[in-house]
Image: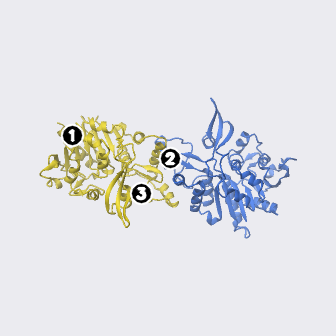
Chain colours: A blue, B yellow
Amino acid sequence: MRITALAGGIGGARFLRGLRAALDADPVLAQSELTIVANTGDDITLFGLRVSPDVDTLLYTLGGGIDEAQGWGRADDSRRVQGELAAYGVQPQWFGLGDLDIGTHIARSLWLGEGLTPSQITERLATRWGLPEQRIRLLPMSDSPVETHVIVERDGGPEAIHFQQWWVGELAQTPAQRFVAVGLERAAPAPGVLEAIREADLILLPPSNPVVSIGIILGVPGVRDALRGAVAPVVGVSPIISGRPVRGHADTCLHVIGVESTAWGVAGLYADFLDGWLVDPADAAGAPAGGPVAALTSRVYDGPLLMSDRPGAGRLARAALDLALELRG
Amino acid sequence: MRITALAGGIGGARFLRGLRAALDADPVLAQSELTIVANTGDDITLFGLRVSPDVDTLLYTLGGGIDEAQGWGRADDSRRVQGELAAYGVQPQWFGLGDLDIGTHIARSLWLGEGLTPSQITERLATRWGLPEQRIRLLPMSDSPVETHVIVERDGGPEAIHFQQWWVGELAQTPAQRFVAVGLERAAPAPGVLEAIREADLILLPPSNPVVSIGIILGVPGVRDALRGAVAPVVGVSPIISGRPVRGHADTCLHVIGVESTAWGVAGLYADFLDGWLVDPADAAGAPAGGPVAALTSRVYDGPLLMSDRPGAGRLARAALDLALELRG
């Protein structure tokens, strides 16, 4: 079975680790190949080093190196390098990079400088993290640089800042007018991305941020069309539970784009290609009576949608898998 | 009093820390300004980061951050970043960069990328290390990239390798044919270098490597002429004691350029501008009877030339200072 998923960082990574565990625990599905298309719109150059937060979170989570409590960065990391940068007065200091994590960024930046593509670099990094042995292929959504910017309201009028500055540096507190994914319109899908969607047997959308993670991947020219035309059923997991985001500031992002912060509001963003939608019992009642969302096969997941532990993430992934298998028939 | 010194890494840094201590302990000389012209021919790009070993050793030694036992790198450093690079298969691994040290290299590389010159960067780094408060001005010899390469004998014939690879990676064991300082002929002295030589009251040469440290600085167009024309007396300290180098592989380097590895052989390299020469008692007897070296005012230093501790380095520097003051009259 070939399974393809689109993913952002923490939520996507935890869901996909659960999915791999669910697949491995299934005698029939254990040999399945999992291809992950990662959002790279969060990528940022910090201290001259290229950081790819979602790719790294996926690598570390799936490879066993993640800081579990934090959800991003490396376990048992230290901040000695960044402490030196601070002592030298280097800005910004709102983004905390650990020493082990910086090793990844130095390697990525070195290889980019040598002319390797993000795809080739991700493959090298994934090898070290043992993803091929787990039958996981991790692809950046594009080899072209895409950077999500946020137009915020400052005293002097609108100002564009990097998504990470808004999200991490300002905790999404600064009123935002809109998102602009710089470079997205002319970004080609990375090698293998469209094929992974077209040739998949099942396609899953983890509960990643629908605006700045999944939404950015969907904006890569060709990706949305490939999903619309995919043979495989597309099943998503709601990132909104009882009107609140699983984590992060997804509700704030939805508000910025003028979409209702509900499980059904998010489903509406995917309605042109989505076949199945997994929601929390608390959200089941709010399903619209008509329109494209009403035509979806939605299923109420009776466990917690919140992936508070690894078994929980595994059960959630299994439920999404079961819905997809059912829709595939 | 304005004192100018040319310097390489470890030996130069220890001598100059001793010099600063000797100046500070002297009621008349405590306010003296010390300008150091540092060799940058050892500079190398490792893992995409620009490393300037002699500048960094001078910064850390004079700023109180040096690994005293090792003589280079930061005290209490760790190797977490490089461990990650090794795990990703990044080469070379023969050069060990500590995490704190990497902070310096990231800052330097970032600022180079922003268009700052090595002079401007060195000034920023020196500020953090408190050099201005110590009345020390640290100048790179040039803002143009210069890299000392070594032509070694390999199976297939001569091959050029970076000096650091030969020195650190191969411990200067690989037979060398000659040194080539790439970029040296067209390197302009950094701002302030020629002025610091011309306007100095005293000029000192620490016991740095005469071939690959002092020798490279002397090769920057204009530097040697400035020394020849300097008003100040030029006093050097022999890096060779009883025919053996104070540290490092200076004897090997002298052999490569066909110069006798003695205190007098080294003096011969500086004879066109040197006024005073401090030698170990064991070497005093070998002074040539004629020629330019015989015309030097040489002085036997009755303490150890080996700077095994800070007070020892201070006494040696004081002796060099006294000889220079005497020659200045």
Label 1 secondary element: loop
B26 vs B92: above or below: above
C-alpha separation, residue under disc 2 versus residue under disc 1? 44 Å
Front label number (2 vs 1): 1
Task: Note whether residue B192 is visible.
Answer: yes
Q: Give the number of the disc on residue B233.
A: 1
C-alpha separation, residue under disc 1 versus residue under disc 3? 38 Å
Q: Give the number of the disc on residue A82.
A: 2
Marks 3,2: beta carbons within 8 A? no
Q: Give the number of the disc on residue B47.
A: none
Marks 1,3: beta carbons within 8 A? no
Please name whichever residue, A65 or B263, is drawn nearer the observer in this view of the structure: B263
Residue drawn where x is 65% and y is 62% of the image: A136
Q: Residue furthest bottom?
A: A27
Q: Position of residue A329 (x, y in %)?
A: 82, 64
Front label number (3 vs 2): 3
C-alpha separation, residue under disc 3 versus residue under disc 2? 21 Å
Task: Note whether residue A310 is visible.
Answer: no
B136 vs A79: above or below: above
Label 2 marks a residue whose chain is A
